[in-house]
Image: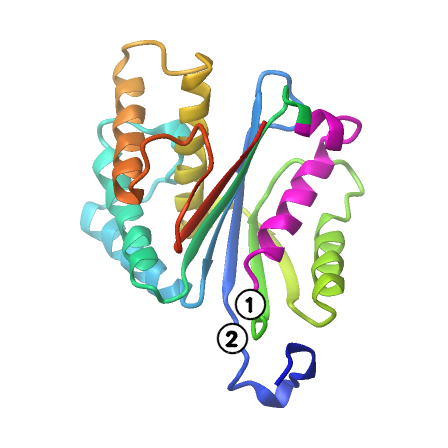
Amino acid sequence: MEPQDLKLSDYKLIQTPFAFLDETGLLNSDRDRFFSLGMVKSPNPYEILNEIEKIRHRNNYNEEAKWTSVFPKNLPIYKEMLTVLFNALESNNGTKYCMMIVDKKGKYFKSHYNADPFKAYEDFSIQLLKGNIAPNELIAVIADESPVPSGSTYETNVKNAINNNFQRLALHGICKVDSKGNDLLQVVDLLVGAITYDLKAHHKLAGQGKSIRIKCKYELLDFIKNKLGVKTFVKDARNLAYNIKVFT
């Protein structure tokens, strides 16, 4: 059966995964050279969330997990939380991690988005979703709240672009939420932050000191590299479970 021929009565054939989107690097700020958007797609996010909840209870940890808040006291907990996702990626159950990074000083960003930097956020969302929706899938998106221009129709624009691209109902909606209430968005934040940090350090924009905080960030970054089998995030990296694209 062709995807466009699927009906609601074919619910046994339709898969309904969730995608969790988070970004780093303010688009309209000259201080942030890199803008990154990451996404975890999972057919069973509740399984990942349940395991992370157990970690929180075991460690009596109720704070939001954020890359900007990596310290010795929470570093082991962050590793545990990330390990839950890495185990899901390795299980071949359909869980994937995808990410796009753009250098705002590079040719790609200037030629495509210089006049409207917020367009990059919208366009990256569309590209990530286009490349990760299977023919029999109807996806829902949970996105972290992000600063957008007043009157922005981001949710509608992305939804229409995806459904027009597939000529069917492939994305039924986007809901923006505060990441404080969603552990998967927090895990995406850790990944997006760490991977972007590798690029910043490469360009000597971060990680040049010897403070405890910087050491913790490098330790978490190295942990992620080892888990994904990647030596550097300065260039594209991918396998069946993850795809990280860098635009310069």
Q: Residue 187 location in percent, x, y? A: 39, 45
Residue 42 image-quadrant placement:
bottom left
Q: Is residue 148 visible?
A: no
SS of the residue under disc 2: loop
- Measure the alpha-carbon separation of dots 2 and 1: 9 Å
In the structure shown, which secondary structural element does the residue marked by tag 1 occupy? loop
Instruction: From the image, tell me which residue sits under label 1.
Output: 134
* Residue assigned mark 2: 15
Determine crowd level at label 1: few under 14, some 14-19, many 20+ residues with C-alpha closer than 10 A.
some
Quarter of the image containing the C terminus? top right
Q: Nearer the viewer, mark 2 or mark 1?
A: 1
Q: Quadrant of residue 14?
A: bottom right
Is 91 in front, or is 83? 91
| Residue at the left extreme, as displayed | 58
Verify whether residue 160 appears in magenta. no
Do residues under tags 2 and 1 come within 8 Å of each other at their CB atoms? yes
State the count of labels.
Answer: 2
- 202 left or right of 124? left
179 relative position to 87: left or right: right
Q: Residue at x 37, y 16 (%)?
A: 207
Q: Quadrant of the N terminus?
A: bottom right
Start and end of the magenta stretch?
108-133
Residue 32 place in picture, x, y as percent: 57, 21
Q: What's under tag 2, amino acid-wise? A: Gln
Q: Residues within 10 Å of mark 2 (few under 14, many from 20)?
A: some
Residue 3 vs residue 117, the one in the foreground: 3
